[in-house]
Image (spheres, rainbow, N blue to C red):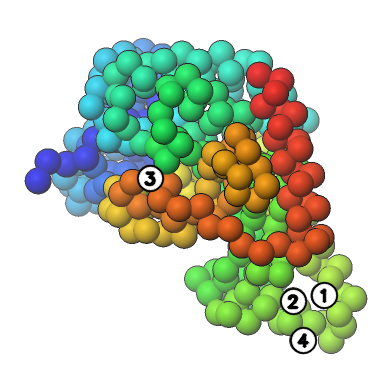
Amino acid sequence: MARKKIALIGGGQIGGVLAQLCATRELGDVILFDVVEGMPQGKTLDISEAAPVDGFDICLKGANSYEEIAGADLIVVTAGLPRKPGMSRDDLIATNSKIMQSVAEGIKQHAPNAFVIVISNPLDAMVTLCQRITGFPKNRVMGMAGVLDSARFAAFIAWELGVSVKDVNAMVLGGHGDDMVPLVRYANVFGIPVMELLEKKYKSAEKAKEVMDAMVKRTANAGGEVVGLLKTGSAFFSPASCAVSMAEAILRDQRRVLPVCALLEGEYGVNGYYVGVPCILGANGIEQVIEINLNAEEQALMNESVSHVKALVDSL
C-alpha cells in the first residue's frame, strides 16, 4: 500500500517539529515547504539522518516550490509570523493574511484533494481565508486550536490535583483568543468532576472556585505566557503535537472526538463562521460536529467568543 503524502507549509519552529513527529509516528512521507532556500532541505536532512536511531522508514524532503506538494493527502499550514511579547494573535492579521492568500492558492492549484489543518494565527481568520480561497468543502479545511487549548487546561488541572495527565478530560470551545471558553462543568478526572476534587482538596467550595478561575484564566493566556518567556517567538512543541493528533485521526481513520475549529452552519446558533467545537475526526475529515448542551453562563461566554471571531473575520 502506497504511503500517504503529508505536506507541511512553513518550515519554522512548528514545521520542523511536525516533520519529526510525522516521521517518528510513520504517518506518511513528508514534504516540508518554505520560501527560505535551503532551510527546509536542511531540516529534513537532519531529521532523516536520525532514522536509523529512531527506526522510521519515511521519506522526508525539503522544498521551495509549491509544485512539490502535488498529490498531498494532508496539509498542515504553519506559515506566518509568530507572536512577539506584547502582541495579541489578532495583531498578526494584516501580515499573515497576505501569506495565507499565497499558501491557499498554492494548495488549490497543486493539492486539490487534500485535507487542510491550519495552525497560523490569528487562527479563526486564517482558516476562514484558507477555506474561502481554496473553495474546499468544510469537512476538508479545519483549524487546530481547541486541541491545544484543551491540552493546556488539562495540564494545569493535572498539576493542581497531582494526578496523571492521562486521566484528565478537559475541553475548551470558542475562538482561539483571550475569550476562549474552557468548560469547567465538563472537566473531569476519570469521570470525577474536577470541581468535586478541588472542593475535597481545599475543603471549601469558595477556594475551589478561586483555584479553578485562576486555571481558566491561565488557559486563556497560556500562549502569551510562553511568548513572554521565550521573547523571540511563540509555542511550537505543543502546537505541533496537537496538529499531529488531528492528522493521525484523519489519516488512520480513528474517529476521535476532538475540539476542532470548524465551519458551522447553524450548530451552536452560529452560521458561516469557523469556531472551536467538538467534532468527530476520521477518514472524511470533520465527519460530525457534536452539539453539547451549554447552560446559560456557558452559552453567554460562547456568544462573546463568537462575536470576537466575527469581528476578526469581518475585518478580512
Q: Which mark is residue 285?
A: 3
Q: CA distance from mark 3 to mark 2?
A: 34 Å
User: 20 and 261: which one is in front?
Assistant: 261
Image coords of residue 137 (percent x, y): 41, 33
Residue 129, image quadrant: top right
State the mark number for residue 200: 4
Question: CB atoms at circles 1 and 2 under 8 Å apart?
Answer: yes
Mark 2 or mark 4: name the one nearer the start of the chain.
Answer: 2
Would you say the residues marked 3 and 1 are in contact, meaning their CB atoms lie under 8 Å apart? no
Query: In which image quadrant can residue 280 be found?
Result: bottom left
The residue labelled by disc 1 is 208
* Mark seen at residue 195: 2
Which type of secondary structure does the marked residue at label 3 adopt? strand
Q: Residues within 10 Å of mark 1 (few under 14, many from 20)?
A: many
Q: Residue furthest left?
A: 1
Q: CA distance from mark 4 to mark 3?
A: 41 Å
